[in-house]
Image (cartoon, rainbow, N blue to C red):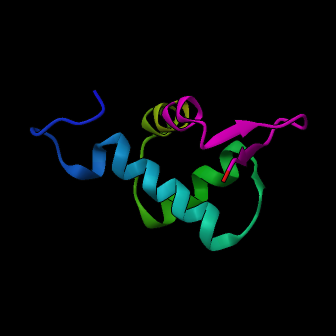
Amino acid sequence: MIVNKNTNPERDLYYLGGKIIEVFVSFKNKEYDYFELFSLVNKTQEISLNLYSLVLDWLFIMGAIKKNNKGYIEKCF
């Protein structure tokens, strides 16, 4: 579920998606390796690998990120 009033906001896709976008904005890189991005996000917000993958899926569906030809995660904004 994307938003659930019974969970902590730190586990919502909106909040965690924002944290991933913050990493893209603060480091100014256009592309990241899957685990490199996970490590950077985990420094500011503790997140499981499963939840991280779910958030990336959500960001991909929204068109905020994509996978480039080299296999890196690339921002689309």
- Which residue is outermost to the left? 6
The answer to whether residue 45 is above or below residue 6 is below
Q: Nearer the viewer, residue 75 or 47?
A: 75
Left or right for 30, reference 27: right
Image: magenta residue range: 58-76
The answer to whether residue 14 is above or below residue 56 is below
**Is residue 64 highlighted in magenta?**
yes
The spot of residue 77 in percent (x, y) is 66, 54
Across the whole image, how many numbered discs are drawn on residues?
A: 0
- Which residue is outermost to the right? 70
Left or right for 35, reference 51: right
| Residue 56 found in image quarter | top right
Query: Which residue corresponds to the image point at 11% horizontal and 40% vertical from the top-left?
Result: 5
The spot of residue 61 in percent (x, y) is 55, 28
Query: Which residue corresponds to the image point at 60% horizontal and 43% vertical from the top-left?
Result: 64
**Is residue 34 highlighted in magenta?**
no
The spot of residue 37 in percent (x, y) is 64, 53
The answer to whether residue 61 is above or below residue 24 is above
Left or right for 29, reference 40: right
Query: Which residue corresponds to the image point at 67% horizontal and 46% vertical from the top-left?
Result: 35
Quadrant into which the N terminus falls: top left
Query: Which residue corresponds to the image point at 90% horizontal and 34% vertical from the top-left?
Result: 69
The spot of residue 11 in percent (x, y) is 29, 44
The answer to whether residue 62 is above or below residue 32 is above
